[in-house]
Amino acid sequence: MNHEPQPNNASDAPRNCSCKSGSECCQSPEPPRRGFLFAFGAVMMTLGGAVASVPVLGYLFGGATRRYKTEWVDLGPLEQFPAGETRFATFITPISSPNDGATAKTACWVRCIKSGKFQVFAINCAHLGCPVRWFEQSKLFLCPCHGGVYYQDGSRASGPPPRGLFEYPWKVTDGHLAIDAGMLPGLQETAYFPEASA
Ligand code: FES
């Protein structure tokens, strides 16, 4: 037996209801404002969730889509690199944009061991990245920042660098020396690919 009180006169009808008690409109107690707030909250939560998921999705899938842009860059005709000498060379890095201006210019050291055989060193010290300088008299690369020293073949001689200079893959095409540039060398990612310069 149901003992629930039933609205049996106008005073028992929900507020804001102008109809007679027991009529159909009084059976839906949901005011329109509550429905609107619910829908608004649902939309805002969906938007917030979408925005919050962007960094998570970037973390999950960013590695799969990231690509180093490496490409062969011309360093100039072979006559610029005489056998037995180490020469300074510059190139425009492939990962630059038109707005980079002069900062897109990157340097390297080209060692011509003998005709047709080269080593191309990244200019950055393997310690903390300062530009190293070649000294012909002592046949050494010296780093001005913390005193790192490298032999002419790029191997570490002394100081804080944990390894030798990074090298770029190189090739000779139509009498010009080119390097596979673009990927900045780091301790985890060497720019040297022996098979490319073999
Ligand atoms: S950056 Fe070259 S020795 Fe530290």
Image (cartoon, rainbow, N blue to C red):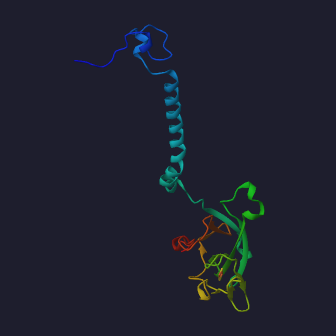
Comparing 28 with 111, the one in front is 28
Q: Is residue 23 above or below residue 83?
A: above
Residue 47: name its quadrant: top right
Furthest residue in direction bottom, as rendered: 138
Comparing 173 with 50, the one in front is 50
Identity of the residue drawn at 74% across and 91% down: 137
Identity of the residue drawn at 25% across and 18% down: 2
- Please give the count of numbered marks on the rendered protein: 0
Q: Position of residue 132 (x, y in %)?
A: 69, 80
Q: Quadrant of the C terminus?
A: bottom right
Residue 108: name its quadrant: bottom right
Identity of the residue drawn at 42% across and 17% down: 28
Comparing 194 with 61, the one in front is 61
Q: Position of residue 22 (x, y in %)?
A: 38, 9
Q: Is residue 102 above or below residue 41?
A: below
Comparing 172 with 22, the one in front is 22
Q: Position of residue 191 (x, y in %)?
A: 57, 71
Q: Quadrant of the N terminus?
A: top left
Q: Is residue 150 above or below residue 90?
A: below
Identity of the residue drawn at 44% across and 7% down: 20
Q: Position of residue 10 (x, y in %)?
A: 44, 10
Furthest residue in direction right, as rendered: 102
Q: Quadrant of ligand 1?
A: bottom right
